Image (cartoon, rainbow, N blue to C red):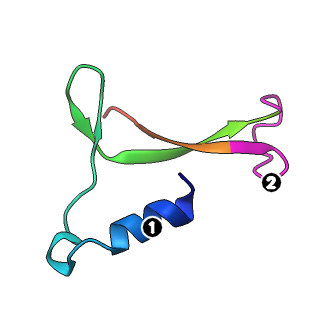
């Protein structure tokens, strides 16, 4: 799924649901707000978020 696909899916929700929070389920069942992280081709270049170095985007969570 690409970001465009996700945006299209979310905008296709009825308008009454579009103000609801989006949550990510942790392995222990806890719910957290999603965080977007980068899966990099060259992990030593952590500041290089160019399309050449970003392999994919990862929706994850961050505790606390």
Residue in the picture at 54% in, 66% down: 4
Q: Which residue is mark 1?
A: 7
Neighbour tally class for label 2: few under 14, some 14-19, many 20 plus, Cα within 10 Å: few
Q: Nearer the viewer, residue 5 or 39?
A: 5
Is 46 included in the stretch rendered in magenta?
yes
Residue 1 appears left or right of 16: right
Tag on residue 45?
Answer: none
* 15 up-or-down from 23: above or below: below
Of badges 2 and 1, nearer the viewer stands 1
Residue reaching furthest top? 28
Report helix, strand or loop for mark 2: loop
Is 20 included in the stretch rendered in magenta?
no
Residue 44 place in picture, x, y as percent:
82, 29
Which residues fall within the magenta stretch?
A: 42-55
Q: Nearer the viewer, residue 57 or 4?
A: 4
Residue 18 place in picture, x, y as percent:
24, 72
Q: Which residue is mark 2?
A: 50
The CA span between labels 2 and 1 is 21 Å
Residue in the picture at 73% in, 37% down: 40
Residue reaching furthest bottom? 15
Report helix, strand or loop for mark 1: helix
Residue reaching furthest left? 16
Residue 48 place in picture, x, y as percent:
80, 47
- Find residue 51 and report its image quarter: bottom right
Residue in the picture at 81% in, 44% down: 53
Residue 19 place in picture, x, y as percent:
21, 71
């Amino acid at each position: 799924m690409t970001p465009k696909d996700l945006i299209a899916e979310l905008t296709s929700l009825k308008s009454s649901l579009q103000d609801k929070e989006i949550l990510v389920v942790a392995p222990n069942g806890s719910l957290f707000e999603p965080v977007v992280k980068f899966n990099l081709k060259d992990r030593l270049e952590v500041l290089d978020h160019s399309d050449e170095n970003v392999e994919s985007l990862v929706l994850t969570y961050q505790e606390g």
